[in-house]
Image (tube, grey):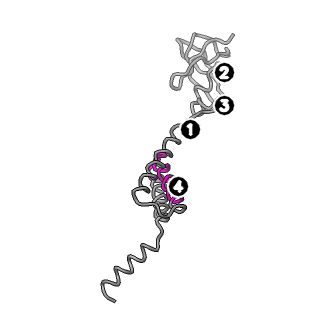
Amino acid sequence: MGEGSYHATETIMFEAISTHYLWWILALLLIAGELLLPGYFLLWIGIAAAAMGVVLWVVPTLGMLAQAIVFGVLALAACVLYAKFLRPRLERSEPGNERLNRRGEQMIGQRYELIEPIVNGRGKARVGDGQWLVSGPDLPAGSTVEVVAVQGTTLQVRAAA
């Protein structure tokens, strides 16, 4: 078997792979790249490559320049659709979730009992089964206070009405 037959076999092998399969392989590589470098950008270009594979499967005679143009349009359309429609829906927070992981801010408006008097603007209040530092006007232990703000781990309070 000479060197010429090797190149002929290689050419036949690549001709046997339809071009739409190459677009689908590119799509898989781009989507896999998204897993390594998250950011939603490669995902949409990968989806465009998969769509290009479908277009080429339906219209197998599409030339390379036409494929490049159609892919560019599909990639641009996929990224614009994500940015204009999907991203705003994903970023929209449900009412009440804006303080989900900020426990102190969830306490604003709540009332608690002082377990240590507020003296010189500092004291402690019972919150659940724990204690929180409070800051506010001087009040005796046992007073009910309302949280009006949070500064770090200190609750800003006022006397409850």
| Secondary structure found at label 3 | loop
Q: Quadrant of residue 127?
A: top right
- Classify residue 89 as left or right of residue 29: right
Give the mark nearest the N terminus, 3 or 1: 1
Tell me the crowding category of disc 1: few under 14, some 14 to 19, or many 20 or more residues within 10 angstroms, Cα based.
Answer: few
Q: CA distance from mark 2 to mark 3?
A: 15 Å
Instruction: Give whichever of 57, 106 is nearer the camera.
Output: 57
Span shown in magenta: 36-55
Instruction: Decide whether the magenta segment is chiefly helix, strand or loop.
Output: helix
Residue with the mark numbered 2: 110
Q: Tell me if residue 121 can be seen.
A: yes
Q: Residue at x 48, y 44 (%)?
A: 79
Give the mark nearest the N terminus, 2 or 1: 1
- Return the mark for residue 131: none
Q: Amino acid at mark 1?
A: Phe
Residue with the mark numbered 3: 129
Q: What is the x, y in percent for residue 43?
A: 49, 50
- Classify residue 72 as left or right of residue 7: right
Q: CA distance from mark 1 to mark 4?
A: 19 Å
- Return the mark for residue 51: 4
